Image (tube, helix red, strand yellow):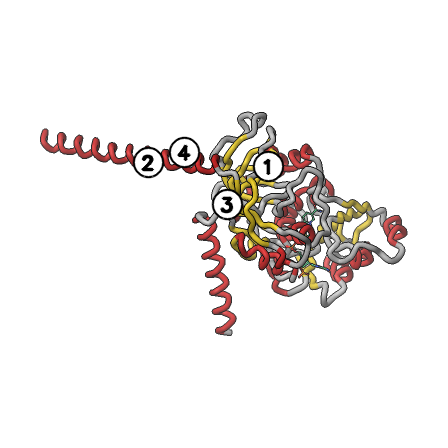
Amino acid sequence: MVLLLRYSCKLISRVSFFVCILCTAFRLNAVISHAESNNKTEMLAAYFDSPGEPDVLYVNQVPIPELEDNEVLVKVQASAINRADTLQRRGLYPIPPGASPILGLEVSGTIEKVGASVGSAWKVGDKVMCLCNGGGNAEFVAVHFKHVMPMPANTNFLEAAAIPEVWLTAFQLLHFVGKLQPEDYVLIHAGASGVGTAAIQLVTLAKGKAIVTAGSEDKIKLALELGASAGFNYKETDFSEEVMKFTEGRGVNLILDCVGGVYWEMNVNCLAMDGRWVLYGLLGGRSVNGNLFLELLKKRISLMATTLRTRTDEYKGQLVEAFSQQALSHFERGYLKPVMDSVFPLDQISAAHEKMEANKNMGKIMIRVAKDNTDAIGVVDSINNINKEETQIKAEL
Ligand SMILES: NC(=O)c1ccc[n+]([C@@H]2O[C@H](COP(=O)([O-])OP(=O)(O)OC[C@H]3O[C@@H](n4cnc5c(N)ncnc54)[C@H](OP(=O)(O)O)[C@@H]3O)[C@@H](O)[C@H]2O)c1
């Protein structure tokens, strides 16, 4: 018995010795990796020299951004592309003053450095997702500390990078600008877009009813799966007539409109009295031809236009705070899901832009930045597997 006890004690002490060595090695490794990146002055970033088609994009070696006192430096794991990036690449989107000229409006990653006035809000090593004022399609990005959110539990880096820009935009359109009420009918154009897929889920969460328009049956099917009550293919039908039928003549209370121009008449036709129309993009043209003002007066319609990127740091900070309080826990519980279309490595960013400009995506087009990102690789594999399964099913049919 005594022998057995002595043997067990020896074994326990040896095991703890090895665990100790392993932990020290792990910590040392983490310290070295921080020290390495602290000494780095350059990073890889998506870049273009002059505006043009997607093939002007390439990966360049550029300086790591300097940190302002109210910023954190994030080591980027994943990022995404947005329409604003494609417009900027074409030279059609003036960069707001002080913003990074590098593309990329959202990232996930870990905090590498903290600015002098950030205080205890964030610390080195925190896993975060951020709304960026540009600069996200790169290995490092400097972000205002109030535009940073913790990654929801159970989300990987790719999923987290699919959240900031389109979910904050949708939240802003619905709650800050559109004043969404429970039971409202909300018409969401481009229902399978990044913003559209987020808006459908946020409307449902707030007990409203989402109706979408989209350009294909597959896109409408996705919108219905995400919770939309109805969806209409704008290429085949006058959506305003369908909306009036579906709402039994009541019309919609709110429209989220990223199309503009060609939709104005159908929008006013299917808005309810005192309806709100939030314009946030001009995919369908920038001018109107006809009696827009008269139609607005007849139904007492409020037409509001908004852009997120040009808002002040304070406004964005308030938006991030409200979204974090009201929405983040729903990601953790699985009620809200970022919808990802595909993942491209940083050096294939031109193919990602091409896909977006061809309107082929449903949900977000992601950019994998860190090569050693095992989370991201896992998701890439699972998306590839889904694609393989879909191809196999289609082939069998
Ligand atoms: N104001 C802001 O703060 C803000 C912020 C973020 C995004 N945005 C805007 O929001 C929109 C959506 O952005 P996103 O990143 O979510 O886009 P996205 O995922 O690229 O989806 C855009 C979709 O819009 C549809 N579309 C394109 N041209 C159209 C047209 N002429 N008429 C009708 N539908 C058209 C296409 O789907 P179909 O196949 O269904 O036609 C396309 O896939 C963009 O216009 C973007 O600039 C604005």
Residue at image mark 2: 25
Residues tagged 2 and 1 counted as in contact (Cβ below 8 A): no
Q: Could you give the CA–CA distance between mark 4 and mark 2, rounded to whole angstroms?
A: 10 Å
Mark 2 sits near ligand 1, with its Cβ under 8 Å away: no
Residue 266 visible somewhere in the drawing = yes
Q: CA distance from mark 1 to mark 3?
A: 15 Å
User: Which tag is nearer the camera, tag 3 or tag 4?
Assistant: 4
Identify the residue at horizontal 54%, vertical 36% (top origin). 73
Mark 4 closeness class: few <14, some 14–19, many ≥20 residues within 10 Å: few
| Residue on which disc 1 sits | 143
Q: Which mark is residue 259?
A: none
Is residue 391 rendered to the left or right of residue 22?
A: right
* Residue bearing mark 3: 77
Q: Is mark 1 within 8 Å of ligand 1?
A: no
| CB-based contact (under 8 Å), mark 4 and mark 2 | no
Residue 205: horizontal and vertical position, in percent? 62, 45
Q: Is residue 6 left or right of residue 137?
A: left
Which amino acid type is marked by label 1?
A: Val
In the image, what residue type sits under mark 3?
Answer: Gln
Q: Which residue is mark 4?
A: 31
Q: Position of residue 389 (x, y in %)?
A: 47, 65
Relative height, residue 236 to residue 26 (above, below): below
Q: Determine whether the residue tagged by mark 2 lies in a helix, strand or loop.
A: helix
